[in-house]
C-alpha cells in the first residue's frame, strides 16, 4: 500500500500518513461505484498522491522541530512553507456575503434537482439508493417518497429519523394499507357496540370491608394519591389504612385517639397529602402529619370574651373543617360559636386564627351556627351552611365583613345542612340537609335551586354528598327509616336529578361516603363500624385491588426448647449449674443476702388468691391475721371478766391509790346488810330484788 493512501466519506477529507485529501478529490471520485462510501478506484489514488506531492512542494523542506512542537504542526505534512507564511504581515480577509448566499441557494437548488432526478430514475443499478417512505402516506398518497439518502456521495438528509431499507413494493403496500383500514373500521364498530352508559361507570361489582370498630364511622378521608385511608368514629379512635401494605386480613397499621374523649366529626387530607386535619367535637382542631404525629393544635378561645373577633380561637364544639385547595398551609373550621375561622400552620400556627367570619341570619340579624363549610375549587370563595337553613359565601380576596352571595331559605329552618360540596366544574354546588332534601345550586343564578329531591332520610349530622369523577352524577347516603331494612347509597343524574342507580349497603345506616377520582372506587362509612370499599376490577385502579390479590401472611411459629437439667455432682463449684428446682431455699437465701440489690428488695406478695400479701401466713385475710395475733397475746381470755376484776380487789383495799383516797373525808362509812343464817335463800333473793 502506498504512503499517500486516503479514504473519503462524503465531503469529509481525512489525512492518513501525512496526506491531506480535500473535497476536490471527492469530486473526482463521483463516478466511483462503491455503495455507501469506499476506497474508490486505483486511478483516484494516483490523483490523490499527485495532489499531496504538489501541496508538499509548496511548503518546502526546512522545518523547525521546536516550532512544530509548539504550534502543533507535527504530523500534518511539511511546515517550512507555513513558517515562511507566518512571518508575513497578516491582512484582514474580505468576504462577499451576497455572493455566498447566492452560491448557497444555487447549490441547494441543484441538490434538490438531483434528488428529484434520482427519485424518478428508480432503475439505476450503478448506485445504491436508500429510500425513506413518507410518514404521512395516508393523508398524502401522491407523496409516497419524499427523501433519499445516498451514502458516500456528499448528500445529507434533512430528517433526523431516517429509516433505511429497500422500497416497499406498491402491491404489498396497498395490501397493508387495506388491512390497516379494515382494522380501524373493526375497532370503530366495536366502540360503537360497546357504548358505556352512566350506570356502568359506577364501581359496584366487588366489595371489601375495613373493620374500624363497633360504633358508627362519622369521618372518612382518602389522600389525593389514593394510597391511604383514614377513618374516625364515635369511639374516639382514628385508624390509618394503607392499601399497598395490607394483606387480605385488612388490618390497619396504626390507631390513636387524637382528641381523647371527643367524637371525630371530620377528617381531611391536605392538597399535598402530607397533613391531616382532625375536627372533633371539642373546640380545638388538630393537624397531624401523614403518620399520625401531632403538628399543630389550635388554641382555645376565652369563653368570657363576647366579641369573637377579639378572641383567638373557638369557644364551642366544632362541626366541620376543610383545607384550602391552593394554599397548602391554610384550613377552615366551623363551630357552634357562630363563627368560621381561617387558620395557617406556618404564620401564627395554632396560637390564633388569621381571620374570623361571623355567621348571621340576615332577616333577624341574630347569629346562627354554621354546620358545614368548604372552599370553592379555585379557592376564591368561602362557603358556610348555617343552622337557619341559609347558604352564605364570602370572597376570599376581601375582608369577611359582608357576604358576596347567599340564599336565606335554602333548607328548612332549624335543621342541619350536613354537607356543602362544589362540583368539579366549580359552578354547581350540592347541599344535603337533615330535612331529607338534596339540592343542586348554580352560583351564576344563586337565588333558586336548579334541581332538588326529597325523601332522603338521615339520622346523622355528618352525612355528606359527593360528585362523581366525570361530574355527571351526585352520590349521597341514607339511613334506615321506619319500614325500611337497608341503608342505601343513591346516585342522581346531575342534569335532570333523576335517580340513576342505588346500592343497598347493609342493614345499617350510611353515614359517610367518598368517590375517589383517581382510584374510581367508592368508600362508605356505616353505623356498624365498618368501612366498605366498592370497586370494579376493570374500571378501578390500584386501591383495594392491591391488597386483595396478596397472599395472607401467616403468624410465624416460634419453637421453645427447654434446656435439660444436667446433674454433675462431682464437678467443680465453678462449673456447677444453678438448678432451678432446689430442695432447700436456705442456700439461695444466703446467696441473695450477699447480693446488695436483692437484699434491699422487699419480699414479693404471696401468689395465693384472696391473700393480702405476706399477711397470708396468718390466714386468708388481714382480719384473720389480726385476730390471731390478739389471741396469742391475751392468754387469759377463758377467765370470767368478773373474776378477773375481783382478783385485784384485795390489792386495791390494802393499797388504795386512785379512788378511795379522794373520798375518805367526804364519804360516809358504808354499812352493808348482814345476812341471817336461818333465813332461806329464796326470800333473800326476793328481798334483794324488790326490797
Image (cartoon, rainbow, N blue to C red):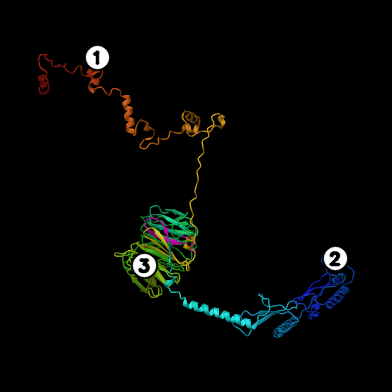
Q: Are marks 3 and 1 in contact (CB under 8 Å)?
A: no
Q: Report the span colored magenta.
A: 209-228
Mark 3 and mark 1: Cα distance apart in space? 104 Å
The residue at which mark 2 appears reads as 67
Give the side of residue 176 with respect to residue 553, left or right: right
Residue, far right: 61
| In front of the other: 212 or 94 | 212
Is residue 13 visible from the viewing direction of this image?
yes
Per the image, the residue denoted by label 1 is 654
Question: x%, y% of residue 421?
Answer: 41, 67
Which quarter of the rendered picture does the N terminus lie within?
Answer: bottom right
Q: Earlier in the sequence, mark 2 or mark 1?
A: 2
Crowding around mark 2 (Cα neighbors within 10 Å: few <14, some 14 to 19, many 20+) is few
- Give the x, y percent position of residue 308: 38, 59
Q: Is residue 658 above or below residue 207?
A: above
Residue marked by disc 3: 432
Evaluate if marks 3 and 2 touch, with contact meaning CB atoms under 8 Å apart.
no
Q: Which of the marked residues, 3 or 2, is nearer the chain's N terminus? A: 2
Cα–Cα span, label 3 and label 2: 93 Å
Percent x, y of residue 511: 37, 62
Amino acid at each position: 500500500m502506498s504512503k499517500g493512501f486516503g479514504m473519503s466519506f462524503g465531503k469529509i477529507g481525512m489525512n492518513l500518513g501525512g496526506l491531506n485529501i480535500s473535497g476536490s478529490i471527492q469530486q473526482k471520485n463521483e463516478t466511483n461505484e462503491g455503495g455507501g462510501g469506499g476506497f474508490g478506484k486505483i486511478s483516484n489514488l494516483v490523483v490523490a498522491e499527485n495532489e499531496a506531492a504538489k501541496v508538499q512542494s509548496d511548503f518546502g523542506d526546512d522545518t523547525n522541530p521546536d516550532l512544530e512542537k509548539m504550534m502543533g504542526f507535527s504530523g500534518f505534512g511539511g511546515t517550512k512553507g507555513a513558517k515562511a507564511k507566518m512571518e508575513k504581515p497578516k491582512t484582514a480577509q474580505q468576504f462577499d456575503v451576497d455572493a455566498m448566499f447566492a452560491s448557497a441557494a444555487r447549490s441547494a437548488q441543484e441538490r434538490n434537482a438531483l434528488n428529484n432526478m434520482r427519485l424518478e430514475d428508480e432503475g439505476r443499478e450503478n448506485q445504491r439508493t436508500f429510500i425513506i417512505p413518507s410518514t404521512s402516506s395516508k393523508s398524502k398518497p401522491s407523496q409516497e417518497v419524499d427523501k433519499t439518502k445516498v451514502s458516500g456521495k456528499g448528500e445529507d438528509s434533512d430528517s433526523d429519523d431516517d429509516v433505511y431499507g429497500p422500497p416497499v413494493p406498491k402491491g404489498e403496500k396497498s395490501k397493508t394499507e387495506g388491512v390497516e383500514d379494515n382494522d380501524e373500521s373493526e375497532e370503530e364498530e366495536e366502540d360503537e357496540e360497546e357504548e358505556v352508559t352512566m350506570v356502568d361507570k359506577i364501581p359496584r361489582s366487588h366489595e371489601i370491608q375495613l373493620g374500624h370498630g363497633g360504633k358508627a364511622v362519622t369521618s372518612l378521608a382518602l389522600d389525593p394519591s389514593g394510597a391511604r385511608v383514614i377513618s374516625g368514629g364515635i369511639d374516639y379512635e382514628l385508624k390509618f389504612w394503607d392499601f399497598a401494605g395490607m394483606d387480605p386480613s385488612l388490618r390497619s397499621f396504626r390507631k390513636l385517639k387524637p382528641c381523647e374523649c371527643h367524637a371525630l366529626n371530620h377528617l381531611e387530607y391536605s392538597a399535598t397529602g402530607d397533613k391531616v386535619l382532625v375536627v372533633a367535637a371539642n373546640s380545638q382542631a388538630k393537624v397531624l402529619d401523614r403518620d399520625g404525629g401531632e403538628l399543630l393544635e389550635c388554641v382555645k378561645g376565652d369563653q368570657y370574651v363576647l366579641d369573637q373577633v377579639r378572641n383567638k380561637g373557638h369557644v364551642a364544639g366544632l362541626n366541620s373543617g376543610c383545607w384550602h385547595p391552593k394554599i397548602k398551609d391554610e384550613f377552615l373550621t366551623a363551630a357552634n360559636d357562630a363563627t368560621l375561622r381561617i387558620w395557617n400552620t406556618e404564620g401564627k400556627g395554632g396560637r390564633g386564627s388569621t381571620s374570623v367570619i361571623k355567621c348571621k341570619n340576615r332577616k333577624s340579624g341574630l347569629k346562627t351556627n354554621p354546620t358545614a363549610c368548604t372552599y370553592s375549587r379555585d379557592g376564591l370563595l368561602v362557603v358556610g351552611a348555617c343552622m337557619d337553613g341559609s347558604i352564605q359565601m364570602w370572597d376570599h380576596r376581601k375582608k369577611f365583613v359582608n357576604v358576596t352571595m347567599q340564599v336565606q331559605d335554602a333548607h328548612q329552618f332549624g335543621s342541619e345542612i350536613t354537607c356543602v360540596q362544589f362540583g368539579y366544574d366549580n359552578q354547581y354546588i350540592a347541599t344535603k340537609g337533615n330535612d331529607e332534601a338534596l339540592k343542586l345550586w348554580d352560583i351564576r343564578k344563586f337565588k333558586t335551586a336548579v334541581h332538588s329531591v326529597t325523601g332522603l332520610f338521615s339520622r346523622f349530622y355528618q352525612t355528606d354528598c359527593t360528585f362523581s369523577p366525570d361530574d355527571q352524577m351526585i352520590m349521597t347516603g341514607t339511613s334506615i327509616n321506619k319500614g325500611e331494612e337497608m341503608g342505601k347509597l343513591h346516585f342522581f343524574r346531575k342534569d335532570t336529578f333523576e335517580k340513576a342507580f342505588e346500592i343497598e349497603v347493609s342493614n345499617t345506616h350510611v353515614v359517610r361516603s367518598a368517590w375517589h377520582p383517581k382510584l374510581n372506587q367508592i368508600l362508605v362509612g356505616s353505623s356498624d363500624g365498618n368501612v366498605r370499599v366498592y370497586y370494579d376490577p376493570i374500571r378501578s385502579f390500584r386501591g383495594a385491588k392491591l391488597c386483595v390479590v396478596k397472599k395472607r401472611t401467616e403468624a410465624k411459629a416460634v419453637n421453645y426448647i427447654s434446656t435439660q437439667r444436667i446433674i454433675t455432682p462431682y464437678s467443680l463449684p465453678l462449673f456447677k449449674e444453678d438448678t432451678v428446682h432446689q430442695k432447700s431455699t436456705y442456700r439461695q437465701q444466703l446467696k441473695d443476702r450477699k447480693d446488695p440489690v436483692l437484699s434491699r428488695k422487699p419480699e414479693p406478695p404471696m401468689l395465693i388468691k384472696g391473700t393480702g400479701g405476706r399477711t397470708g401466713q396468718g390466714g386468708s385475710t388481714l382480719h384473720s391475721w389480726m385476730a390471731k395475733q390478739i389471741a396469742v397475746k391475751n392468754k387469759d381470755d377463758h377467765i370470767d371478766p368478773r373474776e378477773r376484776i375481783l382478783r385485784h380487789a384485795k390489792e386495791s383495799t390494802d393499797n388504795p391509790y386512785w379512788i378511795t383516797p379522794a373520798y375518805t373525808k367526804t364519804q360516809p362509812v358504808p354499812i352493808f346488810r348482814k345476812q341471817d343464817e336461818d333465813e332461806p335463800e329464796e326470800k333473800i333473793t326476793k328481798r334483794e330484788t324488790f326490797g
